[in-house]
Image: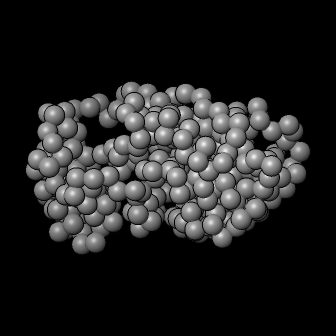
Amino acid sequence: GAGEHKQAVPAYEKVLSLKPDFSPAHNSLCQAWLQIEQAGIVSRFRLSSTRQAYRRWLDAVPGQPIAMFMLDALEHGKTPGRMPDAAVASTFDAYAAEFDKHIRSLGYRAPELVAEVLARRLPTADASLDVLDGGCGTGLTAPLLRPYARQLTGIDLSSAMLERARATSCYDNLLQAELGAFLDSHPDSFDVCVCVDVLTYFGDLHAIILSAARALRTDGLLAFSVEKSSRPGSHLHPTGRYSQHASHVQAVLAAAGMRGIQQVEATIRNEGNAPVVGLIVSAQRPS
C-alpha cells in the first residue's frame, strides 16, 4: 500500500515458505514484481521475475484462474478482452467476508457517485421502475437504488457475495449469473441498469454495452463507473482490473445507439495512498 514493492517481496516470500499454496501471497508477490519491473521500463516480453512468479503460483495451485489470466496476458503480449468468469468468481468468493470493511477503508465512493447521477437524471424516486444492479457484490449500492425500484434485481458471479447481498433484504431477486449472458437473455426488461465497479473487469466495452442497451426499455437509463485511463482505449493493470479512456467509453456508447451521454470525472477510491480517478457515466436508450 505504501508502494514499497522491493521491501514487500521478501515478506511475501516468507509467507510462501510457510504456506506454499497460499494464493493471496502469490497474488501480492506477482503484483509487486510487475510493479517493480514496469517501473524499470521493461518490456512485457522481458518481465522475467513477474512471469516466473505467476508460473510458480500455477505450480503451487494448478488451474488457478487469476494466475492463468495474467500469465496469458504477459506471455502472449496482448491484452485479453476481459477477466474470465472463473477468475472473477474466485477473487470475490475469497474476498466476500472482508469486502465491505476493506473497500470502505479505501474511501470507496462509486455507489454514491452513481446514485448522484440517478438523482440528476431520473425525475422522481417513486418505486416505479424495474432496476438491475449488475454485478451487485455485497449489495453496497442496493439501499441507494431501492427508492427507485418497483423490482430490484441483483446479479453476480460470486455466490459468497450474493449471500452478503441477500442479508441486506433490499433485493426482490438475486441471481448468480454472468452479466453479459444475463443481459442478452433479458431484452427490453429494465428501466434502469446500474453497473458499479463492474466494467473494470472488461477491456473492450463494445459487447457488454450493446448487451446492456438491448436489456433496457425505451428511454431506459444506463449508469456505470469505470477507472479512467490517460491512454487511448483500455488498459490492463497488475490488479487484473482495466481502466478506460473517456473517448473509448464515448465511442462504445454511441456505437450502441445510446443518447444523452454524460461523463463526470471523480475520485472513486484510494489505492497505494493515491486517488484512483474514475468516470461516472450515464446514457439513455433512445425511443
The scheme the figure's colours follow is: one colour
Is 2 drawn above or below residue 89 in the view shown? Answer: above
Q: Residue at x 47, y 47 (%)?
A: 200
Is 111 drawn above or below residue 27 in the view shown? Answer: above
Q: Is residue 146 left or right of residue 263?
A: right
59 and 232: which one is in front?
Answer: 232
96 and 277: which one is in front?
Answer: 277
Residue 225 image position (x, y, % from top left): 56, 41
In the rendered image, the quadrant that contains the N terminus is top left
Residue 78 visible in the snapshot: yes
Residue 281 image position (x, y, % from top left): 61, 37
51 and 188: which one is in front?
Answer: 188
Residue 26 visible in the snapshot: no
Q: Is residue 114 left or right of residue 128?
A: left
State the image quarter where residue 10 is shown: top left
Q: Residue at x 49, y 57 (%)?
A: 96
Tag count: 0
Q: Is residue 141 left or right of residue 8?
A: right
Residue 190 image position (x, y, % from top left): 76, 57
Residue 32 image position (x, y, % from top left): 22, 43
Q: Residue at x 70, y 41 (%)?
A: 259
State the image quarter where residue 261 is shown: top right
